[in-house]
Amino acid sequence: TWGTPGRKHHIPGQDATIARRLKQAGAILLGKTNTPEFTLSFDTQSPLHGATRNPHDLKRTPGGSSGGAGALIASGGTPFDIGTDYGGSVRVPCHFCGIAGIKPTSGSVPRTGMCLPPGGLRDFQSHVGPMARYTQDLELVLAVIWGPDRFDTWIADVPLRRSLDLSLKGMRCLVMENFGSTEPTSHTLTTIRSAAKTLQETGVELVPDELPLGDEIAALEMDLWENCGTAYEIAYHVQKAGTSLDEFSIHFVRDMIRSSNTDFSPDRFHTTVRKLQNVRSQCLQKIADYDLMLSPVNAGPAPVQPGPHEPLFPLHYANYTLVSDLTGWPSGVVRCGTSSERLPIGVQITANPWREDIVLATLTHLEAALGGFQEPSL
């Protein structure tokens, strides 16, 4: 249903590519999990199915947009699920719910059948990736869904590198605690430093550093929404789904759709595209000096669930996840700590394009050393 009223009674005529591949490999579909409308929020509330809660604290959000998946996996309801990631929608729920997940390299897994289909200026930001309680399941599932299907024309025929027996010794790791003015909580910093120490003990060289343009990431994301036709694209899909704009539940998107009819400017469009190229170029050059990057997933653990029309957190809290969607890097999450409220704290491991093996090997090592998934105590 994509969480939208116009598809309340919709039954798909065929499987998405990744669903078909998983079924052919022996997976059993148990059900469909909740998402915000059109997967366009970091919280998981929809006008059809209500709010999904965090199994570690029912007053708190599981994150989004793959919050239904994150909550069900953490609760023991299913061993894995598939999430989508446009700005952190796989990794934020994994972090908030205390599970593992990976957003693979842009262009690696087909989006055929997604509610926001492939194509367009921002195609590189659209990703599909597995979520699970344990890191070994991520690679198992990723191998099944990986590679071209000839329908999604943006997917490259690049083999998936396996992480088995990959040694981290001698690798260089950028340790990024802060990103611009985004200040993480004290427990988040403690968790990052604990993970860094664990990697150092394996022979990884740690380099405290920071990506460039940290304060521009969230602003660029909003510029892309407002100035590059995203609002027009969303309006098209909302209309096609049979949902009226008046009943569309994500207010900031609805407001942008309405204002875009009069405010679209070619000058702003070209300025934003140049900004995007500059951010991608500078960040890609920076991480090329390293094998991997260790950072927070978000500024803090799961916040209290907001009201239906309230933002979950300031957008710049998501700088840590947004940047690898803008650049296309593979990026994964595993639980490595706990907050004072006894909420999960994950860490994020990011690598250069097509180095999922480094991400997965690092997540697996941190999971073994620092505990990984823990059952909710509710």
Image: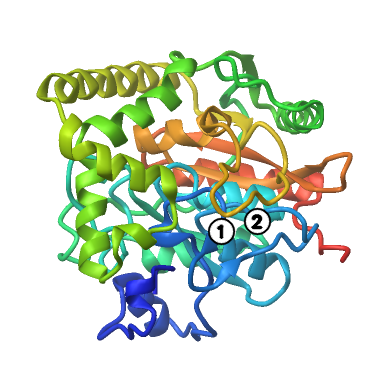
Amino acid carrying label 1: it is: Thr
Quarter of the picture holding the N terminus: bottom left
Amino acid carrying label 2: it is: Pro
The total of numbered circles placed on residues is 2
Q: Nearer the viewer, mark 1 or mark 2?
A: 1
Task: Decide: is 57 above or below 228.
Answer: below
Task: Decide: is 164 above or below 349.
Answer: below
Does residue 354 appear in the picture of this structure?
yes
The residue lying at 49 percent from left, 67 percent from top is 47
The residue lying at 88 percent from left, 63 percent from top is 377
Colour convention: rainbow
Q: Along the horizontal axis of the image, is 298 left or right of 89?
A: right
Does residue 148 appear in the picture of this structure?
no
Q: Residues within 10 Å of mark 1 (few under 14, many from 20)?
A: many
Identify the mark at residue 44; answer none if there is no mark: 1
Please identify the quarter of the rendering in which residue 375 is found: bottom right
The residue lying at 49 percent from left, 73 percent from top is 48
Q: Along the horizontal axis of the image, is 345 left or right of 64?
A: right
Q: Position of residue 347 (x, y in %)?
A: 66, 38
Identify the mark at residue 258; answer none if there is no mark: none
Residue that mark 2 sits on: 62
Q: Between residues 285 and 241, which one lies in front from this camera angle?
A: 241
Q: Position of residue 330 (x, y in %)?
A: 44, 42
Q: Position of residue 289 (x, y in %)?
A: 45, 17
